[in-house]
């Protein structure tokens, strides 16, 4: 990744960033879509050293030159008069959820605003489901502080996949998505702290975790939520059919709560935290299948997510290393974009391979992710601009 220093003239206060902003080591500082509103913070950031990936900057400039600027509005593909990519839309969801949950006053009509946010999330997912999955797998530069909000959004994404496979009607799917977004709403900050801490859970933290389903339901009801399916899934998302869950130890678990629990646990397993390195997707799939004894919920997730999902780093029979970029009907044989030659040396141009072909079959996952730290997703998918409405 070649970095370009970001000049002050390229950043407009109150306008969404059209690219990711990084430091000199390529560490993500501000996500694409972030809105900078404080001039002093902006000056401090620029003084520290702020950079943009050259390929990403070129892609944005090319889209702008082609006249594909989008106009701000309610559509998820439009943002602050700037070119918006599918990646940018996903980058905006975390801040969007945080802002939404910061105002729960009865007069703010929280249920209606959450309905709109959930619908926008589903619309963003539908622009390119493979990119949505890629986002969940490639969390290399994840910020622990936002772990709770990011986890909620990515769990909601898994819920969309599973509900669609189970052929749930849209109203039921939307209740599930809203449950995923709010199940941990009383412990988002705690989740961020725990993701960053280098010591085991404290007793006080454990007590807060046990209480959070009940507290979340109470807060939702206070904010005007009356959807019984939504509330029930939040209340039961840590319960188990054998009675070993919490907070009530009940055994009569709703199907929606069971789906939410599977998505919640699976996403936690593939998400990096200081004390808990992320499992590979294949490892997480294996554990899920064992836990669920090959039941319909694990089957739904595996068939839709894939054994080698978009974002997974794999080695091919040809010797090339590559990133899965697209699912196929065969969960074991996705489309892979190679980022090295057959001797595992990095290459400038990516080539897509169908791993159903024996010469390019996946032979193993790659555990050393250091090569991916500076890999911009635009190299794999292009700019992936969100089409105009």
Image (spheres, rainbow, N blue to C red):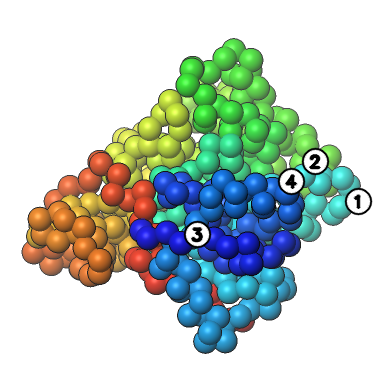
Q: Nearer the viewer, residue 26 or 332?
A: 26
Residue 63 locus on image (x, y percent): 51, 80
How far, Cα to Cα, is label 3 from label 4?
35 Å
Within-10-Å neighbours for mark 2: few <14, some 14–19, many 20+: some
Residue hosting label 4: 101
Within-10-Å neighbours for mark 1: few <14, some 14–19, many 20+: few
Look at discs 2 and 4 and give the one toward the viewer: 4
Within-10-Å neighbours for mark 3: few <14, some 14–19, many 20+: some
Compared with 288, 229 (above or below) is: below
Mark 2 vs 1, N-terminal side: 1
Quadrant housing the C terminus: bottom right
How far, Cα to Cα, is label 1 from label 4?
14 Å
Look at discs 1 and 4 and give the one toward the viewer: 4
Q: Is residue 339 left or right of residue 211?
A: left
- Mark 2 and mark 3 in contact? Answer it, CB < 8 Å: no
Quadrant housing the N terminus: bottom left
Within-10-Å neighbours for mark 4: few <14, some 14–19, many 20+: some
Residue 5: image tag: 3
Q: Is residue 3 left or right of residue 177?
A: left
Look at discs 2 and 3 and give the one toward the viewer: 3
Compared with 116, 228 (above or below) is: above
Mark 2 vs 3, N-terminal side: 3
Residue 107: image tag: 1
Mark 2 vs 4, N-terminal side: 4
Residue hosting label 2: 221
Residue 161 locus on image (x, y percent): 47, 57
How far, Cα to Cα, is label 2 from label 4?
14 Å
Residue 271 locus on image (x, y percent): 44, 40
Residue 44: image tag: none
């Amino acid at each position: 990744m070649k970095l370009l220093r970001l000049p002050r003239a390229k950043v407009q206060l109150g306008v969404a960033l059209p690219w990711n902003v990084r430091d000199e080591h390529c560490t993500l500082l501000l996500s694409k879509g972030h809105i900078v509103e404080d001039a002093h913070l902006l000056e401090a950031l620029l003084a520290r050293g702020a950079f943009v990936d050259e390929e990403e900057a070129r892609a944005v400039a090319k889209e702008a030159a082609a006249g594909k600027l989008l106009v701000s509005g309610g559509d998820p593909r439009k943002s602050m008069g700037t070119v918006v990519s599918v990646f940018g839309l996903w980058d905006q969801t975390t801040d969007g959820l945080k802002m939404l949950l910061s105002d729960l006053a009865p007069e703010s009509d929280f249920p209606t605003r959450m309905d709109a946010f959930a619908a926008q999330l589903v619309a963003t997912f539908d622009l390119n489901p493979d990119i949505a999955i890629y986002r969940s797998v490639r969390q290399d530069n994840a910020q622990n502080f936002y772990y709770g909000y990011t986890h909620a959004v990515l769990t909601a994404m898994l819920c969309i996949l599973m509900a669609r496979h189970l052929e749930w009607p849209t109203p039921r799917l939307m209740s599930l998505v809203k449950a995923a977004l709010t199940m941990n709403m009383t412990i988002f900050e705690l989740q961020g702290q725990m993701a960053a801490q280098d010591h085991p859970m404290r007793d006080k933290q454990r007590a807060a975790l046990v209480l959070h389903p009940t507290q979340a339901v109470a807060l939702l009801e206070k904010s005007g939520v009356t959807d019984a399916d939504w509330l029930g899934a939040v209340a039961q998302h840590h319960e188990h059919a054998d009675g070993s869950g919490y907070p009530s130890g009940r055994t009569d678990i709703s199907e929606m709560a069971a789906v939410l629990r599977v998505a919640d646990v699976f996403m936690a397993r593939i998400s990096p935290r200081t004390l808990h390195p992320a499992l590979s997707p294949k490892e997480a799939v294996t554990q899920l299948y064992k836990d669920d004894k090959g039941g319909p919920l694990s089957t739904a997730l595996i068939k839709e997510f894939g054994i080698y999902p978009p974002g997974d780093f794999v080695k091919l029979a040809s010797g090339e290393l590559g990133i899965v970029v697209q699912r196929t009907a065969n969960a074991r044989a996705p489309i892979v974009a190679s980022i090295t030659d057959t001797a595992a040396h990095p290459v400038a141009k990516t080539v897509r391979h169908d791993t159903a072909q024996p010469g390019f079959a996946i032979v193993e996952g790659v555990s050393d992710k250091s090569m991916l730290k500076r890999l911009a997703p635009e190299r794999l998918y292009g700019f992936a601009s969100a089409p105009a409405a």
